[in-house]
Each structure stands twice: as C-alpha cells, then as structure tokens.
Image (spheres, grey):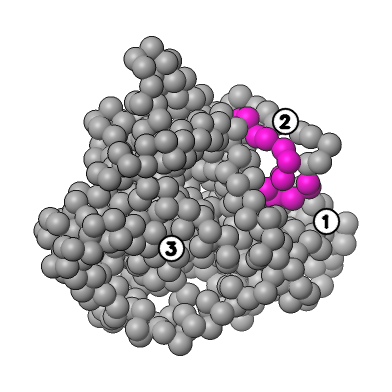
Amino acid sequence: MAISAWWLANDVRMVNVDNAKHLLIAAQWKNALAGGALLDPFTEWLQYPPGVHLVGALAIFVTGGVTVASMVLAENLVFVPLLALGCYGTAKIAFGRTAGLIAVVFAFATPMVMSMFHVFMLDGPEAAMVAVTAWLLLASERFARIEMAAAAGVVAGLGMYTKGTFALFVAGLALMLFLRGGWRNWKGWLTGGVLFALVCGPWYVAHLDDLRGQTSGAIGTAGGPSTPLWYGTVHFPETGTFANFAWYGWNLVNHQLYLPLTLFFVAALGWALRELVARRRQLRDSYLPELLVGGLVGYVGVSMIVLKDPRYSLPCLVFIAVLVSGWIVSLPRRPQLVLAGVLAALFVVNTVNHNFGVGGIHKIETPWTVESPIREYSFTVFNEAGYFEGGPSRSAQPFVDLLDRIRARGGTAVAMDAAGFSGGGWHLGGTTLLVVGQTDLLLSFSPEAVTSRSDFWIARYAVADVGRPPCILSPVADDGTGLYVYRGKVPKQPARVAPDCP
C-alpha cells in the first residue's frame, strides 16, 4: 500500500480506458448518494455490481474531489488487507501457519496483483473477496461451525458485488465441502446459503433481465464471424478446443505470474496431484481435494466465457498461492528454506521491476510464438512494463501544465473537441479525469459552452493540416498532432486563426 501511495503520487498519464470507466461510475454513484438517491447504485444498471465503485464513491466523500489517486488508494486500503488475510487464513487452515506466510508472499509477488492495485479495476478486489470467502469456508469445518458458515455466506454475498464472475471461483470449493461431509451439517450450509442470497439477491434479482442478456452474449459460440476480436483479425478460440482451455494458461506465464512463479505453481500442482493419487485414503480430513477442484472450476468456468481478458482469471490466485505454500512446507527443512528464499527474492525482484520500472523486459521466444496479447508459446521471465503500467509516468504532465497556464490567465472553464480527443491515445473518460482531477476548471465537450473570455476551447489537430505550431504537441502519442488553444471562441477554420496559447 505504501508503494501504491508513492506510485500514485508520482504518476500523471492518460488513464486507461477501463480504469477511467470504473472511476467515472464511482463518481456517478457519489453524485447519486449526495443527491439523496441512496438506492440508485442498486436499482440502476451500469453493467457491473456497485461494490467496488461504492468504495471509490466513499473516497470522493472523504477527500472532496474526483481524483484518480484517492479512489485507487481507497481500493488499496480496503482490498489489499483482505487479499492478505484470505490467502493467509486459507493456507494456515490447509497446511499450517508457515504456509500462510508463504501464500501471502506468493500473492504479493504476483506481477498482475501489483498492476491491478495501481488502477481502479474490479479484478483485484474480486480476487481478494474470493480469498476471504475461501478462508471462511474452510474455517466453517465443512459447515459444522454455524457462525463461520454464516460469515462465509455474508462475505460471499458481498463478493458478488465486486463482479458477477465471483461465483465461478467459490462454487467448486463450496460444492466439494458439501460433498465431502458438509451435507450432514445442514444448519451450517443452509444458514450460509440463506445469508448469501439475502445479501446479493436484491441487486441480481433486480437486474435479472439485464444479466441474462449480458450472459448470453458472453457464453455465445466462439470462433465464428460474430465472435469478438481480441486482436487484429483473429477471433477467440472455439470454446470446446484445447486452444480455448490453454488460453489462460499462457496468460498465467505471460501476464499474471511470469515464468519463475509459474514454475512454482507447476511443481505444486504436480505435488498435489501425486498426493491425491498416492494418499487418497489419508486425505479424508485434508482440504487438498477442495482446493484443487475449487481452482479447476474457476479456471474452466472463466475459460467458457467467449470474451477473454488476461485479468479475468486473477481470482484463481488464492488457490495457486495456497497450493504453492502447501508444496513448500511439505518438503524437508533445507529445500523448504531454499525455495522460501527464492520466493522471497522473486518478491523483491518483481516489486522493483514492476513498481519502479527498472530491470528491463526478458522473454523466451520460440519458433511457434503467436503474435497475440497472451503470446502463446513464449515465456515472460520479467517485464518492467507491467500489465497495465510499470513504473510511474508523467507523460500527460505537459497537458496538465497547459491547463494550469489557462487557469493562470483567468480561465474558469475549458471546452474540448470531443472528436479530436477520442483517438490517438486520448479518450473522453481519461481526459475528463485529467481535467477534473488536476484542476478546478469546469469541463465540457461542446463548442456551445464557449461563451466568454474566461472560456477556452482546446482542439487536437494534425500539425501538418493546420500549418501553424501548436501550443503543445500531443503528449500521449507521437502521432504528429498538437493541441491548439483558443480563448473565447471556436474557430471554424483553424488554419486561418492563430491559437491563443497560454
């Protein structure tokens, strides 16, 4: 969290599209709550359940402004401790206290986790809530402890407010606990199930028709001409093919864990499967089968969704981290210490590499490497660029400085050309957050808003087309465009009017 705070304080860049979308939803819910519409986050449909966005809305209430840093840091303050707690608790119950510590180190050595807590996205919080739910489910002792089963039901219900796919990652674990003796403890599983339904039911019942339409599109037939394109002109793989089920495996190597941590997981998975076969009669009280099936159901479930993204399988992290911890503590003392030391070293290397943007990019390519976002048949060892972002960047600082100069000249509002700021590295959501989060200027994307000398019009044009120097070159993409500022007017022919650069 301290690194995230430092990172956010030093980063000024165009906000990622999805990141901006969720930040603006949080701002919308803040406005609704401030206006007394307390039920709007639960009754209005904005594609996503409102749990994480309400954390961002609370940050706006506390800080008094819509800033990227405050909302992302609020997400860190809530969900980073929950991820640590869930991984530690799950591994401790399954394999002991030492395993709990190792699981936490593994989880926070994961490169994608570092990236996801530099942005305001749903997948990191979803992974945290899956981890806490897994801990409480195991702590219920197959639903025998009613109070822990009740807590698991409530937390799982809250987890459903992070993202709808949450259920995929806890269903297998809960089912195995039920089948392996939990069915006898009917008071426990019934209490947990009722509380789960009571907590998450209102939002999901209210939006049943919306969710039905969303889900039918998500699990439609892949590989055909109507399938969404992930890159270029290549469709997602057919859902029943090996390529489909290997997709998130390659993603694990090249986006989530990278090769060194993936090797830890492969070794742990081999150990777990061997234990399952060799000691199946001694595993009556072990949670190893539950952990394996829980992770498998989550992996297969998310693989069946046509629209894929590298971050969608991140909630499987708790199962990966706990299996790795179980494998390490099962070893004799010396190799246990060696592997724990290697894991600690990877934690340090990934932290420096990923958060500070140093160490370079190291990959192992093969003749069969596919030029796709997940780079099938290649192996990423380290990558300072990170998943979303590597080290802090101040690439948008020239734009913020331009806004400051407008304010210094008496500007109170800026209107921006919506078409010009919808491409070339710009988009309206991220631009809005840069203006609103960095200045007190009023923002509009309509030329009709320019009505006085305190209003400034900002447009983005190709410098070659205008034939005049811009106020600044476009800072978010080196594409030959520049930003032109005009005070109190919107020129119909920019080539004939000199910009009024502050």
* Residue 427: % across, % down: 63, 63
Residue 336: within the magenta?
A: no
| Residue placed furthest toward the front | 281
Q: Residue 463 carries which label?
A: 1
Q: Which of marks 3 and 1 is in front?
A: 3
| Residue with the most extreme bottom position | 209
On the question of residue 25 being in view, the answer is yes
Nearest the viewer among 359 and 72 is 359
- Residue 454: percent from left, percent from top: 54, 67
Lower position in the chain sequence, tag 3 or tag 2: 3
Instruction: Name the residue located 52 percent from the left edge and 76 percent from the top edge.
Output: 215
Stretch in magenta: 370-382
Q: Is mark 2 on a helix, strand or loop?
A: strand
Disc 3 or 1, which lies upstream in sequence?
A: 3
Quarter of the image containing the N terminus? Answer: top left
Label 3 neighbourhood size at 10 Å, few (<14), some (14-19), many (20+)?
A: many
Q: Is residue 97 left or right of residue 422?
A: left
The residue tagged 2 is 364
Distance, label 3 to label 1, CA atoms, is: 50 Å
Tag 1 secondary structure:
helix
Q: Where is residue 444, by image quadrant?
A: bottom right
Name the residue type under label 2: Ile
- The kind of residue tagged 1 is Val
Can you give x and y, in whole percent of width and height, for residue 300 in the image? Answer: 53, 59
Give the class, few, some or many, for how many residues have Cα within 10 Å of label 2's Cα (few <14, many ≥20).
few
Query: Mark 3 and mark 2: span between their CA atoms?
Result: 32 Å
Q: Which mark is residue 168?
A: 3
Amino acid at dot 3: Leu
Residue at screen point 46% across, 76% down:
46
- The extreme top residue here reads 334
In this view, the residue in front, 352 or 370, is 370
Give the camera-side residue of 2 and 453: 2
